[in-house]
Image: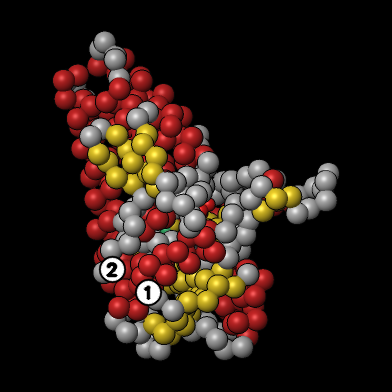
Amino acid sequence: MSELMQPLVWHNTKLRMLDQTQLPHREVWLELAGYRDVAGAIRDMRVRGAPAIGVAAAYGMALGAVASRAGSIADFKREMADISKTLAGTRPTARNLFAALERMQAVAERADNMAVAARSLVDEAIAIHEEQKAADYRLADIGASLIKPDSTILTHCNTGPLATAGGGTALGVIIRAYEQGKVKGVIATETRPLFQGARLTAWELKQAGIPFKLITDSMAGYVMSKGLISAVIVGADRIAANGDTANKIGTYTLSVLAQESGLPFYVAAPVSTIDDSIATGNEIVIEERSLDEVTCIGEARVAVDGVEAMNPAFDITPAKYITAIITEQGIKTS
Ligand code: MRU
């Protein structure tokens, strides 16, 4: 599989992070030495995409452990619980964030020796990262088996290596199917309000050398109705036990349009995105972000002053619109 830019690198007990808010025009690497920096970077979406948020948070806990000056193992555990709470408070929807923090906290809870406690948290963060990469490559192989020859795939938001700190989910499937000669092109939605499609997916597709066209989100119905699409593949931030899926705002619309157009609609996500503790999508907390993201494009204000707006970052696609959920453990159809 072609090696695209990895956004997170653990180096000498520091976390190097590619600042995704600066892409595609500038490649800026941040060097983060403390968990508060990591929490801020997640909140500001310098790292984003559910699996990559999870990996970053795990490294955040590792940074906290390395910097700890706790005098006893009990103090260390309390400190780790506080750090976990800070990191958990950054973005509410991505299940992977909480799955990673739960793993890191379990390691902190098991610690009984200050001399090795920090090392065990660093090792666990590295293991979470490595497992993410392995899951992505397996998921890409499984997902590519669903793609028919000569396909044009529509995808939404950004789900490549930038979003997972591995090989990507939906975009990983597309890249693998392209390498197998089955994808003739990709249609990428720009993904308002923060343009993850126009800025990040377009950047990754260009690096991978895959032919693609960028459309505004509102053009999706048109391209489907004109027979220009073979399948839709998206990622997920949280999947409820019944298969209802939270993903970037606009995903639900695409799923209904795909159904209306008779197109398969696939969700690709690692099992760490599945939340079996909730029965349906109704229980998923949807992040509400700053209204400036809607009324402005970057620094430039578009809407009239004083306008009221809404900015839910995700929506819920009911399981009935999802043809199959692709994970590293197999394909699930409802
Ligand atoms: O707000 P973002 O950019 O973090 O949203 C990302 C998405 O919605 C992705 O589709 C999802 O996290 C899957 S990433 C492999």
As displayed, is residue 186 above or below residue 62?
Answer: below
Which sits in the foreground, 218 or 314? Answer: 218
- Per the model, the C-alpha gap separating discs 1 and 2 is 10 Å
Label 1 CB-ligand 1 distance < 8 A: no
For image coordinates 39% across by 47% down, the residue present is 18
Q: Can you identify the residue that label 2 sits on?
A: 2
As displayed, is residue 13 above or below residue 167?
Answer: above
Residue 329 lies, in percent from the top left, at 29, 63
Question: In this rendering, does residue 285 appear at all?
Answer: yes
Instruction: State the image quarter where residue 160 is shown.
Output: bottom left
Which sits in the foreground, 209 or 142? Answer: 209
Residue farthest along the top direction in this orientation: 71
Image quarter hosting the C terminus: bottom left
Q: Can you identify the residue that label 1 sits on?
A: 209
For image coordinates 37% across by 28% down, the residue present is 34
Under circle 2, the secondary element is loop
